[in-house]
Amino acid sequence: MDQWRWWQKSILNILLGLLIGGLVLLISSQPRGSAIELEPVPTSAPIQVHVAGSVNVPGVYELLPGSRVSDAIKAAGGLSASANPDSINLAGILRDGQQIYVGTDAPQSITLDSQSRTGLININTAEIAELITLPGIGETRAKDIIKYRQEHSGFQTVEELLNVKGIGQGTFDNLKSLVTTGE
């Protein structure tokens, strides 16, 4: 029995010696192959947005994809003294080619300006009093138009009115020739 334990200890010591020797050899050997080179993360092309209305420096600005309306306004020098920050959704995500229009605290001046130039009501700047002059648009629907405009950073096309709650094809057909997005 003592001989058997002696053989067990001897075999265990030999295996342990081989394991330690293998680890030393593995650690001290030179690396094989070549190093992995990581490519730089590709960057997306910047987007361009047009910031207009009541900002300090209106114009076209390049911003990173995923930027917010508030970033575009900062790029345009911030809101002017007459700006109405509630006229737009500051948290809206920008897309390439978008126009951001910041209204003023004086909705009457917007109404007169937009109608005197085109004769059409600009759905991106009109206030409730102006929107309710449209056929089929009451105070509730006018509020829905303004809410949609704020949530989606304005209307890109007149046809987007069909996305507003309560405006169907019939109502849209009656007012589509009376409105503009200001583009």
Image (spheres, rainbow, N blue to C red):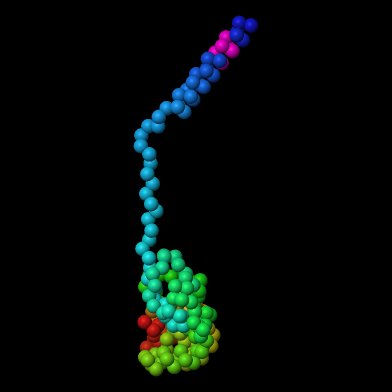
* Of residues 53 and 172, the one drawn nearer to the viewer in this rendering: 53
Q: Position of residue 118 (x, y in %)?
A: 37, 91
The residue lying at 41 percent from left, 68 percent from top is 63
| Residue 2 in picture, x, y percent from top left | 64, 6
Q: Please name the predominant secondary structure of the magenta segment in the image.
A: helix
Work out which quarter of the rendered image holds the C terminus and state it: bottom left
171 within the magenta span: no
Residue pictured at 39% horizontal, 90% vertical:
120
**Is residue 9 within the magenta segment?**
yes
The answer to whether 10 is drawn above or below residue 105 in the figure is above
Q: Is residue 171 visible to us here?
A: yes
Taking the view exactly as shown, the residue that stands out farthest to the right is 1
Locate residue 31: give its quadrant.
Answer: top left
Asked if one can make out residue 165 in the rendered structure from this viewpoint, the answer is no
| Left or right for 34, reference 18 | left
Where 122 falls versus 63 (above or below)?
below
| Front residue of this view, candidates 94 and 119 | 94
Image point (36%, 34%), residue name: 33
Q: Position of residue 27 (x, y in %)?
A: 46, 28
Give the percent coordinates (x, y) of residue 13: 56, 15
What's the magenta region? 7-12
